[in-house]
Amino acid sequence: MPKIALITGVTGQDGAYLAELLLSKGYEVHGLVRRSSTSDVNTTRLKWLGIENDVHLVDGNLLDLSGLIRTIRDVKPDEVYNLAAQSFVKSSWQQPILTGEVTGLGVVHILEALRLERPQTRFYQASSSEMYGLIQEPQQSEMTPFYPRSPYAVAKLYGHWIAVNYRESYGMHASSGILFNHESPLRGIEFVTRKVTDGVARIKLSLAKELRLGNIDAKRDWGHSKDYVRAMWLMLQQDTPDDYVVATGRTTTVREMCAIAFAHAGLKIDDHLVIDPELFRPAEVDVLLGDPAKAREKLGWQAEIPLEDMIREMVDADLERYRAQGARA
Ligand code: NDP
Ligand code: GDP
């Protein structure tokens, strides 16, 4: 019998790569999809990976508890990966309540559905390095205290602790992955890496002249989504549930990341980059740097794709997208 997995957020970046990984391991993969008037658009990432016909899509929303209970009853998953969220930090100041409801309370909805219907199911919660916010240690590990700096991070903190609490209260196999930023050609266009690689492609193809960014001195520990979904799966294969930092252990400024993208396209960064004060945030996370020692020791996991290779892959994918639409340099 193949193992059965349910992924919430299957239409997002990580959901798509995780579905691909689980299919390659012989899983039967189900994905929760919220209804929209453009259902052809929200499966774009699954189509890009060529797996849209291999994933069983279930209508549902993290805010709808009765629907989640029915889904768990019908699908009978062995593993649930809770990746659904309002995941963009900047939007969380515009939509703090929605972010709290989906990214925070949404987690207890799915945990309750599991507790009531299938408590033996293994559960993964997508926690975030944004929870470290105003960092309390230069390199953040599972032991570093949290200090969230956005409504998104505050909501993620609730999600993180409620997963820990259900593990401790009910003995559920709930693990929380504290993942540092991870990117890919499937990253949402609003996040800085993809905004940069898309912008560079547009400039290269004469579709734009400039790229406007906010705080380019911010530093992030960036990895590749393909590497990071492997860590999620490994967590649920352990006998004992636990929490793990997933990171590369290297931090880079937005400016340096940009320079890689511009250089790859043969462009000069100073000719095109414009700093726009409108794009600064009300509160910033200046620097993140993860310590992945525990994941390395206990899961045998480590990041394999370096930042330079990932950014070049993303620029090439964005150039290809525009060329497929008829753009010429
Ligand atoms: P995306 O923004 O690409 O995907 C988010 C997913 O959540 C989408 O499938 C979206 O559906 C779905 N979703 C949003 N609201 C609801 C809802 N109310 N009910 C059901 N589904 C909903 O995020 P990523 O793939 O990049 O990230 C996956 C998870 O990991 C998220 O929880 C994110 O916060 C977390 N994370 C991500 C990091 C990163 O660097 N990528 C770092 C640390 C944590 P739709 O397609 O309809 O919008
Ligand atoms: P985050 O770490 O989850 O907020 O991921 P983002 O990719 O959205 O942002 C990473 C960093 O890039 C943050 O410190 C942002 O302030 C900074 N940044 C600078 N300019 C921009 C921009 O134009 N868009 C985004 N999304 N981030 C920017």
Image (tube, rainbow, N blue to C red):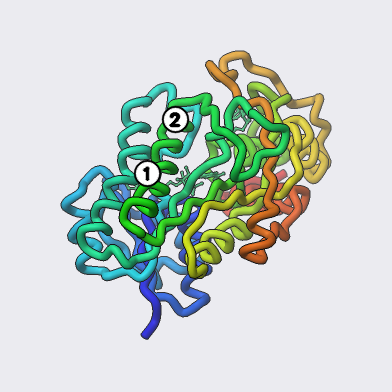
Q: Report the front residue among 136 and 123.
A: 136
Residue on which the image places disc 2: 154
Q: Secondary structure at mark 1?
A: helix
| Residue occupying the point 83% across, 32% down | 268
Residue on which the image places disc 1: 162
Label 1, label 2: how far apart the Cα atoms are: 13 Å
322 horizontally vs 103: left or right: right
Density class for disc 2 (Cα within 10 Å; few <14, some 14-19, many ≥20) is: many
N-terminal label among 1 and 2: 2
Q: Quadrant of residue 123?
A: bottom left
| Residue occupying the point 60% across, 42% down | 143
- Give the x, y percent position of residue 8: 37, 55
87 horizontally vs 40: left or right: right
Quadrant position of the N terminus in the picture: bottom left
Quadrant position of the C terminus in the picture: top right
Q: Label 1 sits on what residue type?
A: Ile
- Give the x, y percent position of residue 279: 58, 20
| Labelled disc at residue 208 | none
- Give the x, y percent position of residue 189: 54, 40
| Residue occupying the point 36% across, 59% down | 172
187 horizontally vs 252: left or right: left
Q: Secondary structure at mark 2?
A: helix
Q: Quadrant of residue 264?
A: top right
Q: Label 2 sits on what residue type?
A: Val
Rendering quadrant holding ligand 2: top right
Density class for disc 1 (Cα within 10 Å; few <14, some 14-19, many ≥20) is: many
